[in-house]
Image (cartoon, rainbow, N blue to C red):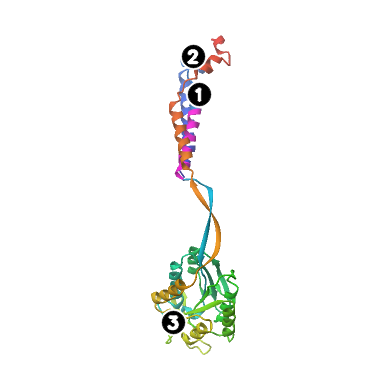
């Protein structure tokens, strides 16, 4: 934006130069003006503006603080691998837990991610099918961003198939040497499949500990249908009766027990976060990644220095012709006079 000053200065100079030429022609012809001011240099005036523009341009660039990678350093990380499998089925929209089961689940996951150090995290969403939302990574900021957008519309097949989430989790961990791998299933416990325990056993055999986080109440609540953020109706069954969805704590406890993990009640956000944090802190950390990071150094001082130099040169220059160039008599002007 500041660089726009440079063409403005150039336009102003051309405007002033045109105005001066016009006024001079009204005063006298060009030959007479050259005789009255023999040391006046048109080239010097234009050159001063060019030097001024270059100087200002360099100063403006220095304000942007340009950087250049000059150094590479190796960073070794230690931690555990964590995958969250988030239930985004329609039942998670129930508001028996404020603001809703899904929003409560996101709060828990976000707070856990904030507590992580160098641990890697991945996110799976599931309903009738499971989908990878975020591959396992150390980029916790990306995890927050992707999690924010998770909703039931992202899954084409509705229902609740926890076994799908576990099967997807088996392929999510890309480090076979990692001794501590955790799969956290965040759900209301509704499960419409019979193969969940088989999938859980497979996860144990792969060295993955399966934890469950239950969100919802045993009393349950209706599933709101919203338009523009407002509830317009509630989901109904084939008989036209409002569907009441209830949390199935028993299923979640069974999965956690079978998966060598632990069941966590997620209705109280901070308590759930503290329990999960304690589990992860006690886990043995392992070096799982070595990366090269560029250490960028500031380079603004070069632009600043040359910018000031050009401004000093511009200030010291006069509009008069340089004497040694005059002595060369390139155009034989002395003889003509």
Give the percent coordinates (x, y) of residue 41: 49, 21
Is residue 166 toward the left or the right of residue 53 in the image?
Answer: right
Between the residue at mark 3 and the residue at mark 2, the CA separation in whole angstroms equals: 97 Å
Q: Callout 2: helix, strand or loop?
A: helix
User: Mark 1 packing: few (<14 Cα in 10 Å), some, or many (20+)?
Assistant: few
- Front residue of 236/176: it is 176
Start-end of magenta stretch:
47-64
Q: Say which of marks 1 and 2 sits in front.
A: 1
Give the residue number, with chain letter if any, for mark 1.
Answer: 42
Residue 74 among magenta residues: no
Residue, x 55% and y 13% (percent of image)? 333
Q: Callout 3: helix, strand or loop?
A: loop
Q: Quadrant of residue 127?
A: bottom right
Between the residue at mark 3 and the residue at mark 1, the CA separation in whole angstroms equals: 83 Å
Nearer the N terminus, badge 3 or badge 1?
Answer: 1
Above or below 134: residue 98: below
Give the residue number, with chain letter if any, for mark 3.
Answer: 216
Q: Residue 254 bears which disc, if any?
A: none
Residue, x 48% and y 85% (percent of image)? 253
For the residues bearing labels 1 and 2, Cβ distance under 8 angstroms: no
Q: Say which of marks 3 and 2 sits in front.
A: 3
Give the percent coordinates (x, y) of residue 209: 53, 77
- Front residue of 172/86: it is 172
User: Mark 3 packing: few (<14 Cα in 10 Å), some, or many (20+)?
Assistant: many
Give the residue number, with chain letter if any, for mark 2.
Answer: 35
């Amino acid at each position: 934006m500041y660089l726009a000053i440079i063409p403005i200065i150039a336009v102003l100079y051309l405007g002033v130069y045109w105005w001066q030429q016009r006024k001079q022609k009204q005063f006298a012809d060009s030959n007479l003006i050259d005789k009255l001011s023999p040391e006046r240099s048109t080239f010097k005036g234009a050159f001063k503006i060019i030097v001024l523009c270059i100087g200002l341009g360099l100063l403006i660039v220095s304000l942007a603080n340009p950087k250049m990678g000059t150094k590479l350093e190796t960073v070794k990380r230690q931690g555990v691998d964590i995958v969250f499998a988030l239930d985004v089925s329609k039942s998670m929209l129930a508001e028996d837990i404020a603001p809703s089961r899904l929003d409560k689940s996101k709060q828990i996951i976000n707070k856990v991610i904030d507590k992580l150090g160098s641990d890697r995290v991945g996110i799976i969403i599931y309903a009738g099918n499971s989908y990878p939302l975020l591959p396992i990574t150390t980029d916790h900021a990306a995890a927050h961003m992707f999690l924010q957008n998770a909703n039931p519309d992202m899954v084409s097949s509705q229902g609740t198939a926890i076994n799908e989430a576990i099967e997807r989790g088996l392929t999510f961990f890309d480090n076979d040497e990692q001794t501590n791998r955790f799969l956290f299933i965040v759900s209301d416990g509704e499960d419409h499949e019979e193969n969940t325990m088989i999938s859980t056993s497979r996860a144990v055999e792969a060295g993955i500990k399966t934890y469950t986080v239950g969100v919802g109440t045993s009393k349950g609540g209706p599933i709101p249908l919203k338009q523009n953020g407002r509830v317009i109706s509630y989901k109904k069954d084939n008989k036209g009766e409002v569907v009441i969805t209830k949390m199935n704590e028993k299923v979640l406890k069974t999965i956690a027990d079978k998966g060598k993990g632990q069941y966590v009640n997620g209705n109280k956000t901070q308590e759930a976060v503290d329990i999960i944090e304690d589990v992860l802190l006690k886990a043995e950390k392992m070096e799982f990644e070595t990366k090269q990071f560029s250490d960028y150094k500031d380079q603004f001082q070069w632009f600043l220095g040359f910018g000031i130099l050009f401004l000093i040169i511009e200030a010291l220059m006069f509009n008069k012709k340089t004497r040694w160039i005059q002595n060369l008599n390139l155009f034989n002007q002395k003889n003509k006079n």
